[in-house]
Image: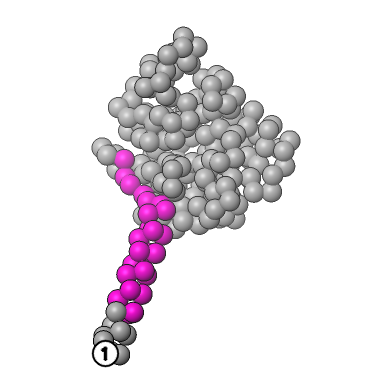
């Protein structure tokens, strides 16, 4: 086998490895627009997902999903591919760290963090350096209006946590919530009671488990 042939084979292998590495890196995260909407997107990092809404005055984002990984950097870069508008809000779905850790890059850009009051109490008590303490809280319900878009934040009681917010876009008829609507596994009356309030909301799309809209 000639030297040129060997070099060619080595270069081919290196190119294949580089392509594989790039594909693996790209598959770590992805952003998709929610079908039937103009301004609602899902950001996925590995198996966790977050929703963000683009308006003419700014962006409303949800969970940073950055526990022990650089998800927030990728998340922000994905948003900035779509719009240069500022990220105005970050909404915590609930208090579990696999969803809400890693938000400091959003805070550095000036985002206001919002969560249920129980989530803020837990975060403030535990004082984790990788979790931004919410600036504002929700009790039973709050409405955020930004750039002509309305987002409702609704607390429907204890479920997967005692701080879960259901996020509803009434115009787009989209509900986003995390980790607690197990449609195929729901058997108990207690779970049915919890799910009942969301079933009465006017929506076309919902997000069981980890925010799949």
Quarter of the N terminus within the rendering: bottom left
Taking 16 as reference, is 130 left or right? right
Query: Which residue: 26% across, 37% down?
Result: 36
Predominant secondary structure in magenta? Answer: helix
Q: Position of residue 75 (x, y in %)?
A: 46, 52
Magenta highlight on residue 19: yes
Q: Secondary structure at mark 1?
A: loop
The outermost residue toward the bottom is 3
Query: Which residue: 30% across, 27% down?
Result: 204
Q: Which residues are magenta?
A: 10-34
Q: Residues within 10 Å of mark 1 (few under 14, many from 20)?
A: few
Q: Of 136 and 64, which appears nearest the observer?
A: 64
Q: Of 189 and 88, which appears nearest the observer?
A: 189
Q: Position of residue 48 (x, y in %)?
A: 46, 42
Magenta highlight on residue 136: no
Q: Quadrant of residue 138?
A: top right
Relative vertical location of residue 18 with respect to residue 163 in this rendering, above or below: below
Residue marked by disc 1: 2
Query: Which residue: 33% across, 67% down?
Result: 19
Relative vertical location of residue 39 with respect to residue 171 in this rendering, above or below: below
């Amino acid at each position: 086998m000639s030297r040129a042939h060997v070099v060619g084979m080595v270069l081919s292998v290196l190119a294949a490895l580089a392509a594989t590495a790039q594909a693996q890196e790209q598959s770590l995260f992805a952003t998709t627009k929610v079908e039937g909407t103009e301004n609602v997107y899902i950001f996925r990092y590995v198996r966790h997902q977050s929703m963000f809404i683009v308006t003419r005055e700014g962006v409303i984002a949800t969970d940073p999903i950055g526990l022990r990984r650089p998800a927030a950097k990728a998340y922000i870069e994905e948003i900035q591919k779509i719009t240069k508008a500022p990220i105005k809000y970050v909404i915590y779905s609930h208090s579990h760290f696999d969803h809400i850790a890693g938000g400091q890059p959003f805070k550095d850009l000036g985002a206001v963090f919002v969560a249920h009051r129980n989530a803020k109490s837990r975060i403030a008590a535990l004082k984790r350096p990788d979790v931004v303490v919410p600036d504002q809280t929700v009790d039973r319900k709050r409405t955020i209006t930004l750039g002509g878009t309305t987002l409702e934040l609704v607390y429907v009681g204890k479920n997967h946590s005692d701080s879960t917010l259901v996020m509803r876009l009434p115009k787009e008829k989209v509900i986003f919530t995390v980790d607690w609507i197990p449609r195929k596994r729901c058997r108990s009356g207690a779970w049915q009671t919890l799910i009942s309030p969301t079933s009465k909301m006017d929506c076309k799309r919902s997000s069981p488990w980890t925010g799949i809209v």
